[in-house]
Image (tube, helix red, strand yellow):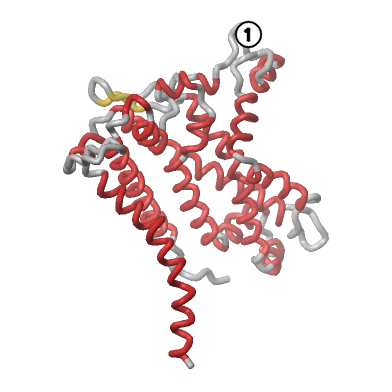
Amino acid sequence: MRHRRLPFIAGFLVAPVVLYLVYVIWPYLQTFGYSFTDWNGFSPDIPYAGFGNYTDLFKDEVFLRALFHNVVILTVYPIITIGIALFFAFMLNVGGSGKTAGVTGVRGSAFYKIVFFFPQVLSIAIVAIIWSRVFESSADTGLLNSLLLKLGLIDHDHPKLFLGETDSWPFKGLSIGDDITLDSPVVLWCLIAVAVWGGVGFYLVLFSAGMQSIPRDIYEAALLDGSSRVQSFFQVTLPLLREQISVAWVYLGIAALDFFLLAFALPSVGVQANHASEVMSTWMYYTAFSAGRMDKFGYACAMGIALALFTLLFTMIQLRVTRSRDKIEF
């Protein structure tokens, strides 16, 4: 009977495996091969360049600046998103003052979950339109500038630029050599804020599902022993959510290393030309498809391979660091 099932199972697997090899694995292999060439993407002639494209990455001022921007995003974006999502998930699931020893969520928690998750259903085009209006550099039509004007924090004739602000914050930048400056412009922090706004809802739902699987008896025992909500959060909730936090950290890290959609859609053309909001994925896109760099397709492929290697390395390190080896006993 077992031998009869093998052809049946194999028959269902052949088509998906073939499609995966043709449309996923083969393009990866092609990209890896093209990264060693000076191909322009159109010519039938594909001159071999060896490792020249990879060595040029370390001389490319824009790529190194974009890499530093990704590092800033990778450092800040996951920490803020996970922190906010954990706080709200704890309040919506355990932070209420119900009748069962204070282990219920706050009143209206189901509604709040819908509100927090709502940004997930919006397309990036809608998100770009909404936040471009929020950050608009006008005291009359920009939502944030209008608020600052009413509070008396800005002058009507000198509104904040936000998405057009290229000055670095919180430091002016680190100079490497004569041509390369590593900085974190204000526009980059605005993009991180938008990413946090859009990502908190998903991870709130993820952590809420994990908290709902924790037996309420554990919380009740902690409260009877005199633990405060803060203590129960750090001593009960966080240890039991280690797997969910590890998954969230990997997903957010991959998103931070990508960050293409927001960096491409939100900043103005002038800011993009100044590379203040540049990340590795956007510079790879411009290198491959911009009109003035059509001979750099092989170089863009090298950027893609480098980005994939960075993402793979981060994922391996993160899974290694956050892997839960010891079972928690109560």
Residue 97 versus residue 146: which sits nearer the camera?
146
Quarter of the view holding residue 99: bottom right
Front residue (pair 322, 163) = 163
- Where disc 1 sits, the SS reads loop
Locate residue 228 relative to residue 128 in the image: left or right.
right
User: Which residue is depicted at the point 53% across and 23% down?
Assistant: 163
Q: Quadrant of residue 37?
A: top left
Residue 147, compared with residue 288, is above or below; it is above
Q: Position of residue 5 (x, y in %)?
A: 48, 86
| Three-letter code, disc 1 | Asp
> At 31% across and 46% down in the image, what residue appears?
305
* Front residue of this view, candidates 193 and 170: 193
Residue at (61%, 6%) from the top-left corner? 157
Residue in the foreground of this view, choosing between 247 and 211: 247
Give percent across and percent down for residue 224: 71, 64
What residue is pinned by disc 1? 155
- Residue occupying image coordinates x 54% and y 71%: 329
Q: Tell me: 275 left or right of 246.
A: left
Q: Does residue 327 appear to the left or right of 138 in the view shown?
A: left
Q: Is residue 169 left or right of residue 330?
A: left
